[in-house]
Amino acid sequence: MESNHFRLLRQGHILDIHEVAGLSGKYVIVSQSCDIVQPKREFIQLAPVVQLLDEVVLRGALKKENPRFALVPASEGGAFADLAQIVSVPKSYFAATLEPVRQGPEDLREAREFGLAVGRWFGRFAVPDEVQPWLAPVQNLIRSKYDNPNSPLGQVMQRVAEVRVEAVDWSVLPVSLTLHVIVKAGCLPTVSEDADLSNVGRLPSQLDELCSAILVENDAVRLAVLWPTLAEVLASRCVPRVKDAEDASVRDAVREIVGEVSSDDEFPLSKARRSEQLDIDFLSEPTPY
């Protein structure tokens, strides 16, 4: 095998394999591009390319609710990589004539989106089973509204870069949690330290009304109060279902949940290290390039 055979292959490229290491059909490369091209890396990781025929499964994959399936860049018919069936194959098994199907990331954005999807499958934080029912309501709420152009919450969430959850120590229950709503740069106004935030008038208490106010508000001081109020309201939605709360281990798992808002260009690294991304991955843009 020529040492530079893999030089032109990248993560996200599709290989049409015929009886190699027991594999046949189309497989997408999930190895990092640097590992693909370096001869000293002896193995290449591949995931089968699948079509999702079940409408429920397809919808979950397209909305990035199911991290098992990653949309393959530039694939015909919206094919997905099944990341639950990744195989590792020695590069030496492939003949030097192996050619990629002429499909793959067309630009750096597509390549980064696919790389983030692969990383999400392996890098998701395992929230304690007793705590997850507390976070599920806000996850489901955001997922259900995000792509709805008629939803005030959906429109507001288009201005949110990420939602993170912070705990001092996840292993010691009950935990005190902070729900961080991290707003895209430029959307959260900067006000002077001596600004009077107490004299902003009535603040909406209902979620839709609050989101509608954020969308139309032009006063920086009032907007600087509306965003933290939204974080607090979302945190208040973190309450387990009645059925889940019947389990004492769930009911007693969380001491409190508070909401905080930050701009993504000012969110402290110290808090990023202490927090975990709430698994609503579609909020994060695949940038910077």
Image (cartoon, rainbow, N blue to C red):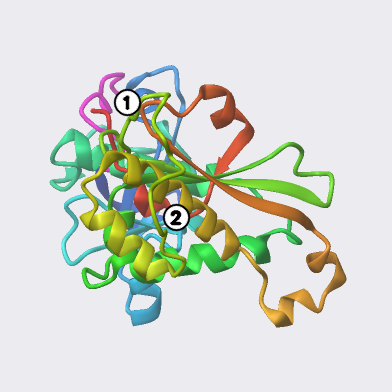
Residue at position x 49%, y 51% from top? 231
Of residues 232 and 51, which is closer to you in this image?
Answer: 232
Residue at position x 41%, y 31% from top? 92
- Residue 168 seen in the current view: yes
* Disc 1 element: loop
Along the horizontal axis of the image, is 283 left or right of 236?
A: left
Along the horizontal axis of the image, is 15 left or right of 116?
A: left
- Amino acid identity at mark 2: Leu
Q: Which residues are the magenta region?
A: 1-12
Which residue bears the numbered disc 2?
230
Residue at position x 25%, y 34% from top? 186
Residue 242, above or below 3: below
Does the stretch in magenta take in 263?
A: no
Residue at position x 38%, y 34% from top? 263
Does the stretch in magenta take in 6?
A: yes
Residue 243, above or below 65: below
Which residue bears the numbered disc 1?
1
